[in-house]
Image: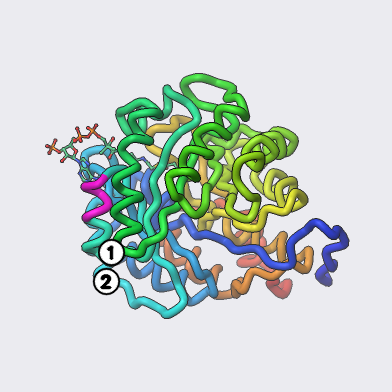
Amino acid sequence: MSSDTANSQQLPDRVTLVEMGARDGLQNQLEILSAGIRSELINRLARTGLKRIEAGSFVSPKAVPQMADSYKVFDLLHRQPGITYGALTPNLKGFEAALAAGADEVAVFASASEGFSQKNINCSIAESLHRFEPVVAAAKKHGLNVRGYVSCVMGCPYEGDIRPSAVAGVAEQLWQMGCYEISLGDTIGVGTPLNAKKVLEHTSRHIPVSALAAHFHNTYGQALANVLALLEEGLSVIDSSVAGLGGCPYAPGASGNLATEDVVYMLHGMGIKTGINMEELLKAATFICDQLGIPSRSNAGLALSRSSHPSR
Ligand code: HMG
Ligand code: MG
């Protein structure tokens, strides 16, 4: 099948993928992997052409044991020039640990829903934003960029529907605080394309679309459709996870993230560049699925591994 050239003026020529596999992908797995295997996954992902890789999180190991020892993961990386290795930091303690580990950038994570904020990070939205202020200030002092996440942008496991204006309000506060990019997270994967556009429309009243990213879980199979809807609105930074791994321990029922293989297949098929080599991506997917003893959740990954069809 030949690649169709993008025929819409609005579609970007190039999309940046932010790889979630080693963090969001592993944080909810039954199997707790060693730092050695986690860093090996990242080293393999670094060979694919991905330029932004979330490598771990500096959160309470009691809350998320899968992410314990993230400092060891950083220590074992074969760092490649031009790749940003990021880490999640919920508070100053996490930031200091991420800094000591050598994270290139950090991310704070808020929620558009009070219920999820309480379950996930044990505080209200307002308290979380208050906690993030010194993290952003310290990061700036050390020359590190801070990404901001807003979770539950199209639905919450505890509160149901979420208003786009609530999402925009939290996103704007993270932006005003100094986050350079805001990733809009459909944590439980319930959103559909027109809702996704609505969330983007509200949020982009406060933040340029060029500083927004989309983070879709694929629980209801809507992630690719949502991505396309937002590409049409000019968004060009997408979070995805190798083999479609993913989930959040505090988002019951949520399945994996949008699979990196699936979004790469779609983008390359539309003539949109990602800089990613599908063969290397498939190798990284096979490696991590073997380690976890689970099948890939990527349709493109499964199809390409079985077929003689040339990969994108
Ligand atoms: P807390 O209990 O309110 O915190 O938890 P605390 O300050 O009262 O401390 C309690 C204990 O945690 C203490 O230890 C602290 O030292 C320790 P103890 O005295 O009991 O032994 N602690 C820490 N340890 C390591 N690193 C730290 C840290 N901070 C405190 N940074 C806290 C608050 C945020 C720490 C906790 O709730 C937590 O770690 N939550 C983790 C939540 C998480 O990682 N969720 C998954 C990531 S978010 C996500 O997946 C969504 C996203 O993908 C986007 C989307 O899909 O929408 C990003
Ligand atoms: Mg997530």
Q: Are marks 2 and 1 in contact (CB under 8 Å)?
A: yes
Residue situated in front as seen by the camera: 207 or 291: 207
Residue drawn at point x = 42 percent, y = 80 percent = 81
What amino acid does circle 2 point to? Leu
Q: Which residue is mark 1?
A: 73
Q: Which residue is mark 2?
A: 76
As drawn, is 192 to the left or to the right of 2?
left
Residue drawn at point x = 36 percent, y = 76 percent = 79
What's the magenta bit mostly, secondary-structure-wise?
A: helix
Q: Quadrant of residue 114?
A: top left
Position of residue 218 relative to residue 263, above or below, is above
What amino acid does circle 1 point to? Val
- Bounds of the magenta segment: 92-96
Q: Is disc 1 placed on a helix, strand or loop?
A: helix
Reply yes or no: does residue 307 show up in magenta. no
Q: Is disc 2 placed on a helix, strand or loop?
A: helix
Position of residue 160 relative to residue 35, above or below, is above
Can residue 296 be seen here?
no
